[in-house]
Amino acid sequence: MNRLTALWRKETLALLRDRHGLAALFVMPTIFILVMTMALHDAFMPGAAIDVGYAIVDLDGSAHSQSLARRLTKTGSFRLADTPGDVEAARQAIRDGRYALALVLPRGFGERLLAPAGADGQATEPLSLLVDPTLNPALQLSFRNQTSAALGTLRADELTRSAGKLFGLPTPTQSAERDWPDEIVSTAVQNDRSIRPPSSVQQNVPAWLVFAMFFVVIPISAILIAERQQGTLQRLAAMGLPFRFVLLGKLLPFFVVNQIQAVSMVAVGIWAVPLFGGEALVMPAGIGLFHCWLVAAAVSLAAVACALLVASLAQTTQQSTIVGGIGNILMAAIGGIMVPKFMMPGAMQTLAEWSPMAWALNGFHTVMLRDGGFSAILPDLLKLLACAALAIAAASWLNRSRAA
Amino acid sequence: MLTLDGVAYRYRAAAAPALQDVSLNIPTGGVYGLLGPNGAGKTTLISILAGLLTAADGQVFLNGKPLAEARAANPRAIALVPQDCAFYPMLTVAENLRFFGGILDLTATGLKGRIDFAVTFARLEQATGKRAEQLSGGLRRRLNLAIGLLGQPQLLLLDEPTVGVDPQSRHFLLDAIAALPTAGTTVLYTSHYMEEVEAICQRVAIIDQGKVLAEGGLGDLLRCDESVAELVLGIELPAELTSRHHATAMGPLTYRLQLSSASALPRLLDDLAAAGCPLHQLNVGRQNLEQVFMRLTSGSLRD
């Protein structure tokens, strides 16, 4: 116990005096959480306004074309930036970057409203959409869908009015312009109860916490490689200290560091994010909090074990920084930390299943977003613990074979 | 104290063995010098004694017990002071000593006593609160040595302990190491500095290519034929004296002469004085360690 206490004390002092390591472990993830929570604030909020401008070029000038323009404005998702008089002006404005979309309503739009696509044998000029090529295709699609929906309600209202006239039914003199879309309230499913959908802070805190926890690779490898290069490991071995003690000596202090990271990042989510205009992080209560800690503990074991493996593989601190740093970024990119997994194509989602960060994130999401119990997080816990065991075994083997 | 009997070792995938049939006897009390060019097998031998490697063949005994058994009975019996400064630069001197004392599993009271001894022995009193990374080269070497003494070892393995230190620190370190046997610690000392080994070692082994080339008391190793004199002069030896004394040039102003009888030496000195040749150095019947070393290792350049 004397030996382990000495090792833990040494690791703690070494880490406390490594300002760069501390910055990588605590400052970097805090900044990531704040920046990404703000940047993705709207991405996780259904129906939120999109700061993309559009123009309507109304070449028809009819009551129907004006009605369509009003209906689109009322949706409020996209911002009406201009109503230029001709197509060329709209093209120039898109080239100048003043707005990204321009919907052109052709002449005869109102007259041909109930005879689209030449249903009556005469040609109908289609609506056209001018698009900035740098605009996200998903946003283009969203605007097209909103236009189609607005057009559909306009046609329905016009049809109702015409049919009423035809059959002598009482109809309002002007078609009612109902708000569109009809309000749809999103509800996230959590076990037996329902809550509001998770905000960006609920998504970002666990994601960047996982990323930060795996960054222990930088201080761990810096110390282990220095110990190897300076002959300290040899000296410790000559003093009869088994290598497993060296590994154990690093496991506990960095496990504690990971837990402090978890508490700090949660605190950032609860108290710091609201100061910057975001929503406060909501943590599970009761047994859910314990499950959350179980996930954090498993992630920590996997992270420290992976760091020890990288430190054993690398010959120099530069190598470990490159392998550890790039490895973490790759794991984060594949594992859904940087880009949420649901936004990835199918093949990438399958690949994500192989990233320990994906198991970690899934574990946190299961507890924090789905209110999952122990059995729900068990598969991810087992994967993380297996990863930790394999990495420790490989690190021990590498160090043993290097000594021979 | 320490006996090596036919020890051999070969690294995995190495073409030649690092050690072959090495037999040595290192007596208790004293400083034992281990010399050899780079790649001779010194570090391998020290690694075996420190328990970092296991001899593939042969046996090592410490105080009559097989090495592994002796180390298991007393893990602090042998201490290694590596050539590198093997401690933590971000920790202070006191923190380093406390850490390594903890690794040696010293009890709290024992640890304090041993740290006090090590600090006093290595004269580190003024540096205990300094971080190791802020120490001068000499102080680092002293801390490296102090850590080696924490466990009060019976045998201390010193691997090039004076590399990169100033003359004052070297002098202090050599005096301190020479005093260790009186404190009950036998020293196995490896160095490339022949004058250091000559100054503090009582017995010496010279190894090369994994084999022991010579082993024995320092005086025995340095003794040589008394009919041969080696001179270093201030000017060139006149031709007449060269032929009269069968002199051979060994280097710039350095000559080896064959003395025909015991009375030839006074006559030679008279001849040199008469010829106005200043005599800077004269060796008769004893060579220095560097000469022995270069002769035994063929003087060829190593890696």
Image: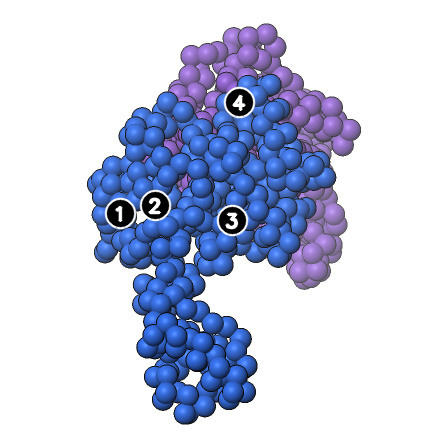
Chain colours: A purple, B blue
**Residue annotated with mark 4:** B106
Q: Earlier in the sequence, mark 2 or mark 4?
A: 2
**Residue annotated with mark 1:** B22
**Residue annotated with mark 3:** B161
Q: Nearer the viewer, residue A340 or A380?
A: A380
Q: Nearer the viewer, mark 1 or mark 2?
A: 1
Q: Which chain is indicated by disc 1?
A: B
Which residue sits at x=69%, y=56%? A97
Q: Which chain is indicated by disc 4?
A: B
Q: Secondary structure at mark 3?
A: loop
Q: Could you say which quadrant of the image residue A383 lies in? A: top left
Q: Amino acid at mark 2?
A: Leu
> In whole angstroms, how far apart are the C-alphas of marks 4 and 1?
34 Å
Q: Residues within 10 Å of mark 4 (few under 14, many from 20)?
A: many
Q: Nearer the viewer, residue A314 or B97?
A: B97
Q: Earlier in the sequence, mark 3 or mark 4?
A: 4
- Kindly indicate whether the residues beneath marks 2 and 4 are on one polypeptide chain: yes
Q: Is residue B45 visible?
A: yes
Q: Is residue B22 left or right of residue A354?
A: left
Q: Earlier in the sequence, mark 1 or mark 2?
A: 1
- Kindly indicate whether the residues beneath marks 3 and 4 are on one polypeptide chain: yes
Q: Residues within 10 Å of mark 1 (few under 14, many from 20)?
A: many
Image quarter (top left, top right, bottom left or bottom right) of the N terminus of chain B:
top left
Q: Are marks 1 and 2 in contact (CB under 8 Å)?
A: yes
**Residue annotated with mark 2:** B45
Q: Amino acid at mark 3?
A: Pro
- Kindly indicate whether the residues beneath marks 4 and 1 are on one polypeptide chain: yes
Which residue sits at x=55%, y=19%? B107
